[in-house]
């Protein structure tokens, strides 16, 4: 039994002119401990797929099994990190990180302690009382990560978390993400990472799912066998990049 | 001509426009000043369309006259400056004179013996403000839950918005006679009728603004709230209510404006030769205007009402607005 099983998922949205088919026949399994990247052209339904997996967008047909069970409603063991950070501007860093803890039934003192731990882990020690608008983009996304990690999820779901950041900040945060995933005291087992940056997917993931648009579908599911830490300048890295590029370009 | 009159005039109008834009950050002026600033550009436009054709004719005639010695650019600029000073100077003198006249008239009216009704003004103000507050509380009590329901259900939102638009755009004052007659017939209470009338002048502004606020809550924040498992009440408390607070304040300011407007008509009502009234600043004003024709009383009621409106704006709405736009701003 796989950790996550997606079975023949399709999704249509109501549009001005009838229904728009956004996803069709999405089927794949994720094994426990896997870091999966989903790449594909803009509009192919990557974000929608991610939201179907954690249950905040209902699918039109198909099935998502989490550890062999179908989850009713929202799967709180999947925590989402947003491209736009999606922090509540009127809440302090600490209150933002505590957002998901009330739902877990933690008492206030416990929430505060837990938030503190993860604020430290993402390197924002001392910024507990700051407000999002006082932070740089990189720091905001650190809050986004802390908020997701604080619920101690089994699956971390990333929707282009580095796309709104400058290149240098993105590099640092990618490294930290790998550290978090590999660190034994983190409950996070799996990461599902949506991105349109192919190099990012190859650098981070065990496995890359390549999608095409109209309707969104899987065109290739390939393992990344490169040893970690991965060197972006290595020949094998570039060869794989070229391969994924051509897979995407082929389908236009 | 352009240089002398229109340029200064349009910079003057521009200034108002600028203040209007800047007021999205902090309210520069609330109440009557807003009306003025909105009117600035329009006044310039109207003046321009009335004045430009004859002036252009005169200009042509002057241009057709035999030419005197050529002026250097320096000299013509100086002439323009002198002409401009003359024109502005005379306008200022005229305005000062008009203001003085008005002020003298005001003082003369107020220095007449005050009618005995004047003693009622404080109590009337208090009662009217109480009616306004009650109507506002009723408005809040149904529009806020409505807005929350609209935030839960896009379908309810789609149904409610156009209905609110149609009902809200009906002239409420046209319904006054019906409301008053029905309410008086049923309960005999003019007080209740008055509050209901104020309500019709208030509630729609509040509902419009709240719905607009609901529609502005960013999709990613709503997603985050759901993805992290917030309960419905937690979602309202942490996301929806803070996000609509600025709209709520804006809506409240306009609602109170509409409320005062309705108040004047709501406390005094003549039907079949019978007068229905309750004590309030609106009924004092109406009685003075339609019955006694007492200028002092009209002026006193008007001034005290303006004073209350300005005080409320200064002491309550403006600080609240500043606080709301500062703390609950949606950019981050
Ligand atoms: N709530 C919605 N209602 C209607 N259409 C939607 C909705 N959400 C997404 N879509 C449509 O579904 C398609 C896929 O959107 P999605 O955001 O999943 O793509 P994406 O692959 O994440 O794109 P990008 O790389 O630009 O983020 C788009 O055509 C989009 O317009
Ligand atoms: Mg997307």
Image (cartoon, rainbow, N blue to C red):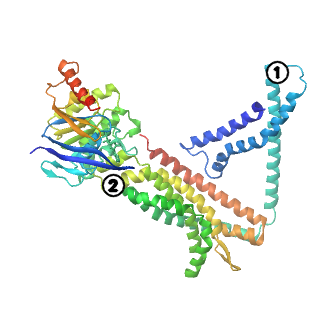
The earlier-in-sequence mark between 1 and 2 is 1
Q: In which quarter of the view is residue A244 placed?
A: top left
Is B272 on the left or on the right of A115, as rendered? right
Query: Is residue A82 positioned above or below A252 on the image?
Result: below
Seen at 21% across and 44% down, the residue is A25
| Residue annotated with mark 1 | B75
Secondary element at tag 1 = helix
Q: Is residue B291 left or right of residue A222?
A: right
The image shows residue A16 at horizontal and vertical percentages of 39, 50
- Name the image quarter holding residue B48: top right
Q: Nearer the viewer, residue B276 or B99?
A: B276
Identify the residue shown where x is 53% and y is 52%. Answer: B250
Image quarter where ligand 2 lies: top left
Residue B9 percent across, percent down from the top left: 72, 37
Q: In the orientation shown, which residue stands out farthest toward the left?
A: A1
Return the x and y of residue B93 as percentages of the image width and height: 82, 42
Which chain does tag 2 point to? B
Q: Which mark is residue A244?
A: none
Can marks 1 and 2 be said to lie on one chain? yes
- Reading the image, the residue beneath label 2 is B234
Asked whether residue A126 appears in the rendered view, the answer is no
């Amino acid at each position: 039994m796989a950790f996550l099983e997606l079975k023949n998922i399709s999704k249509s949205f109501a549009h001005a002119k009838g229904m728009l088919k956004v996803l069709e026949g999405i089927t794949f399994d994720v094994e426990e401990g896997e870091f999966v990247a989903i790449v594909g052209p803009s509009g192919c339904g990557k974000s929608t797929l991610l939201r179907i997996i954690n249950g905040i967008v209902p699918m039109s047909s198909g099935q998502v099994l989490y550890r062999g069970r179908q989850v009713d409603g929202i799967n709180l063991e999947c925590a989402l990190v947003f491209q736009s950070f999606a922090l509540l501007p009127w809440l302090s860093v600490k209150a933002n990180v505590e957002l998901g803890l009330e739902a877990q039934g933690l008492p206030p003192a416990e929430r505060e302690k837990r938030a503190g731990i993860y604020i430290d882990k993402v390197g924002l020690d001392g910024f507990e009382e700051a407000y999002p608008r006082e932070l740089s983009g990189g720091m905001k996304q650190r809050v986004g990560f802390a908020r997701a990690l604080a619920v101690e999820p089994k699956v971390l779901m990333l929707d282009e978390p580095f796309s709104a950041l400058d290149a240098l900040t993105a590099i640092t945060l990618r490294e930290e993400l790998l550290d978090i995933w590999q660190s034994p005291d983190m409950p996070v087992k799996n990461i599902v990472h949506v991105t349109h940056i192919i190099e990012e997917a190859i650098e981070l993931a065990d496995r890359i799912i390549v999608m095409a648009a109209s309707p969104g579908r899987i065109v290739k599911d390939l393992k990344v066998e490169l040893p970690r830490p991965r060197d972006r300048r290595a020949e094998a890295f570039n060869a794989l990049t070229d391969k994924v590029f051509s897979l995407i370009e082929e389908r236009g | 001509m352009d240089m002398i009159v229109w340029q200064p005039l349009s910079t003057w109008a521009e200034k108002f426009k600028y203040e209007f834009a800047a007021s999205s950050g902090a309210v520069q002026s609330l109440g009557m000043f807003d009306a003025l600033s909105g009117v600035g550009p329009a006044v310039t436009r109207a003046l321009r369309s009335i004045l430009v054709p004859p002036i252009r004719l005169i200009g042509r005639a002057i241009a057709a006259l035999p030419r005197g010695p050529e002026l250097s650019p320096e000299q013509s600029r100086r002439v323009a400056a002198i002409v401009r000073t003359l024109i502005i100077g005379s306008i200022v003198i005229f305005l000062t004179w008009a203001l003085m006249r008005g002020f003298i008239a005001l003082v003369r009216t107020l220095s007449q013996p005050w009618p005995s009704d004047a003693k009622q003004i404080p109590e009337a103000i208090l009662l009217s403000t109480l009616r306004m507050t009650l109507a506002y509380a009723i408005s809040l009590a149904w529009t806020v839950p409505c807005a929350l329901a609209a935030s839960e259900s896009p379908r309810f939102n789609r149904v409610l918005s156009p209905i609110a638009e149609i009902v809200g755009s009906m002239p409420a004052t046209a319904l006054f006679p019906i409301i008053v007659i029905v309410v008086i017939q049923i309960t005999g209470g003019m007080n209740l009728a008055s509050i209901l009338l104020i309500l019709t002048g208030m509630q729609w502004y509040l509902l419009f603004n709240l719905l607009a606020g609901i529609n502005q809550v960013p999709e990613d924040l709503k997603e985050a709230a759901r993805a992290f498992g917030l309960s419905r009440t937690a979602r309202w408390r942490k996301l929806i209510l803070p996000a609509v607070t600025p709209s709520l304040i804006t809506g409240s300011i306009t609602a109170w404006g509409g409320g005062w407007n309705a108040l004047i008509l709501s406390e005094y009502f003549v039907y079949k030769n019978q007068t229905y009234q309750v004590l309030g600043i609106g009924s004092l004003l109406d009685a003075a205007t339609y019955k006694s024709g007492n200028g002092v009383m009209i002026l006193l009621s008007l001034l005290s009402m303006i004073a209350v409106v300005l005080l409320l704006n200064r002491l309550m709405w403006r600080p609240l607005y500043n606080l709301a736009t500062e703390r609950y701003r949606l950019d981050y």
